[in-house]
Amino acid sequence: MISLEEFHLIRDYIEKHCGIHLSDDKEYLVEARLTTLMIEQGCKSFGELHLKAVGDKTYALRDKIIEAITTNETFWFRDLHPFGILNEVLFNKFAEEIISGNRTKIKVWCSACSTGQEPYSIAMTFLDFLRKHPSLSPDHIEILATDISSTVLFLAKLGRYDSLAISRGLSDDFKNRYFKKGEKVWTLNDNVKRMIKFQKLNLQESFSHIGRQDIIFCRNILIYFSTDFKQDILKRLAALLRPNGHLFLGASESIILYTNEYEMMRHAMGLYYQVK
């Protein structure tokens, strides 16, 4: 059983290295998710696990701890509204600029992609948009998908999903159009997989190297961060967005208490933000 002192040590270690803030009532979560790792590492206590992690200069154990503690809940077209806004508002806006010669690409960053459902949903939304706009092509969008976990990135790149994963939010039309059905898994078509560039990235570290973006998806992530880190990351996201670029957050997330660098936008029942 984890002691309060051990919980505080590991909680602070996790926040330092990935930004996730665990409240005092999350002892059970740390214990449940790290017990197997503690045993695998030959440690007799969570205090020993913490000491071993601190002393590991390769950061391999750090990455295992972060992967164990991270929540990778995701599904296709989550909350629906962001993808309706892409299809009905933003892609139309950027398509006009491409056709007029004022831009060459739409740059989209999915900042916590988990096993790939969100960036692939963005790609399929764009492919669906192209059916009505044949003057454009998949080359007119560049989608970067990042995550802190090497494991989920590996799975995302495979683009293979079992019957449970494939059933969560994906319509039969999109399944039949963009996937091949196997005996046990559904495999995403290569033309969709080619649209995504996957990359490991820790949001606590600088991400300026990925370049200016037109659209950023940072959804259902801020809820895990402290107030200070929310303010920091929203400021850095604003700096990364191109003028009048757009930010999507999760349905339960808000920027109101953390920044004034964005203007709230509405379309149908959905909300999104435009950098000022």
Image (spheres, helix red, strand yellow):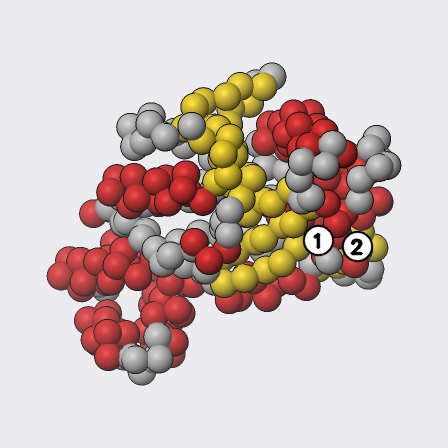
Can see residue 1? yes
Contact between marks 1 and 2 (CB within 8 A): the answer is yes
Q: Residue at x 55, y 39 (%)?
A: 215
Image coordinates for residue 32, horizontal then vertical, percent: 35, 60
- Res 191 label: 2
Vertical order, 259 against 201 (above or below):
above
Inspect the image, locate mark 1, and give the three-letter code of the amino acid beneath it.
Answer: Met
User: Residue 152, located in which quarter of the rendered image?
Assistant: bottom right
Instruction: Say what secondary structure mark 1 lies in.
Output: loop
User: Residue 203, located in which quarter of the rendered image?
Assistant: bottom left
Vertical order, 272 against 35 (above or below):
above
Image coordinates for residue 237, horizontal then vertical, percent: 42, 43
Residue sitting nearer the eye, 72 or 154:
154
Q: How many marks?
A: 2
Q: Is residue 228 left or right of residue 161?
A: left
Question: How far is disc 1 from disc 2 in space, using C-alphas?
Answer: 7 Å
Image coordinates for residue 65, horizontal then vertical, percent: 36, 66
Q: Which residue is mark 1?
A: 195
Inspect the image, locate mark 2, and give the three-letter code of the amino acid beneath it.
Answer: Asn
